[in-house]
Amino acid sequence: MARVTTQRLNQLEVACLLIATPFLLFPSVLSVAALLILLAPWLLRWRARGRPTVRTPMDIPILCMLLMVPVAVWSSALPQESLRKLLGIILGVAFFYGVANTGQTRGWIWCWTLVLVSIGVGISCLSLFGTDWASYKMLPLQPIYQRLPRLFHNVTTYGGGGFHPNEVGGALALLVPVSLSACLALRSRNPGSTATDILALGADRWEGSTKRWVRPLLSRRTMLLLAALAFALTAGVFILTQSRSAYVGMAVGLIAFGVSRSRWFLVALLVVAVMASVLVWSVGVEGVIDSFLPVESGRIAVGRLEIWRRAAYLMQDFPYTGVGLNMFPYVGDAMYPYPSQGLSARVPHAHNNFLQVAVDLGIPGLIAYLALLVAFCACAWRIYRHSQSRPLRLLTAGLFSGMLAHQVYGLTDAITLGAKPGFVLWIILGMVAAVYHLEVDQRGPLITAKTEKTSRLVPSSHA
């Protein structure tokens, strides 16, 4: 009975997340009802299991961040502007605990992996026909841009009303390594351990019914083909963004992913570094910069430094509360105008994830955010070291690489807390917490109990 109750609660929580997501991503008068819908499975689980949610190693940092969110709204000069980010943060935390609560079996872990891959496909399709594509940065892709029809207009306040390529690149930096790890996990042929076998367990209840199409759909070849197509689409759109910050982040993330798979990757990396050094020595540093970076890169660097300096000023002026969620473009322009940007310019964010968190939530919020990332890295490391499942280790490596790529991207750009693509980051955090609970936290007491039982059976040398 308890198992049936848990399964129904999991299904209910996923259904509530799906229902509430549109009303929290696009705030309206129904957003309050959406918050109540998110609260329903927590109350039911509290009544059925004695606790509203599972415990994770990331609970304390998340709680500290949530404590700073009302402070950030209270200190905001325009609370109505901060409300949108507030609802986005609540949605992200709800996804984190939704994944952590439902991910108590391997089948649910891989279902959430499928959700992440599908989100990557959705973002890629929307971005193909709704992004204000750059004419030229590093790669001559203008012929491709000219052939892409523009189907979405006035969806953002940027430029021509389309998505910003840098923001698309930062969002896809989270998802490309996950799609790659899903493809590699599906290649595994070990019975009972592959992602296909785990997903097939969820189709057992359909095999006796009329839905015979479920079994071929979950075959290894079919899912591998779909995963490969999803990876190709996501990676292709990521390349089209030509976001330098996202490119650097992805390079670092893929290097970490390659090292996690084989230490021989370090040897290949050393060879590439030697070849790059020879190229720089023969052509010269200025020649390499002129070949890969356009003329305006120097002006962009100056603009970044100017923005970071003003973000640091805001941190000094509002160290404990921050200026408020989504207040950087308003308070920053009012207190510290940008000479190089012009009087009418409005910089949307601090172009640095960590500075942006400090500006939004204050230094206590930044400390909580850093603690959350440290807890994430510790969980991923322990999963990789102690899990016996090779597909889950591959998945964890992909999740870690995506998070690393996004944080490196965030050193020179930012997707603010509560932004529309921000809930993807919380899903990745929740997946690592769920895999940690499944593969490490639950096995620890069992291993300890077996060790104690064995020690009692073996006679002591002093007896």
Image (cartoon, rainbow, N blue to C red):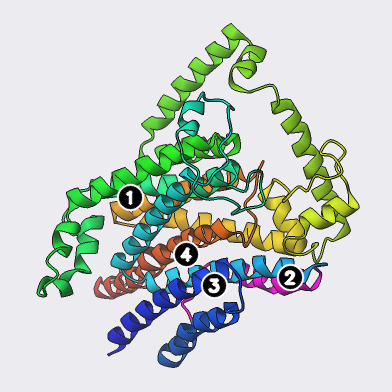
Vertical placement of residue 306 versus 10, above or below: above
Q: Which mark is residue 182?
A: 1
* Nearer the observer, 156 or 412: 156
| Residue 56 highlighted magenta (yes or no) | yes
N-term-proximal mark, 3 vs 2: 3
For mark 4, give the secondary structure.
helix
Question: x, y percentage for residue 328?
Answer: 77, 55
Q: Which residue is mark 3?
A: 23
Q: Amino acid at mark 4?
A: Gly
* Nearer the observer, 341 or 54: 341
Q: Amino acid at mark 3?
A: Phe
Q: Which mark is residue 284?
A: none
Specify whether residue 273 is in view.
Answer: yes
Vertical placement of residue 421 versus 205, above or below: above
Q: Which residue is mark 4?
A: 430
Specify start and end residues of the magenta stretch as a single range: 53-75
Which of the two marks, 4 or 3, is nearer to us in this view? 3
Q: Amino acid at mark 1?
A: Ala
For the residues labelled 4 and 2, the Cα–Cα distance comes to: 29 Å
> At 48% from the left edge and 45% from the top edge, which residue is drawn?
129
N-term-proximal mark, 4 vs 1: 1
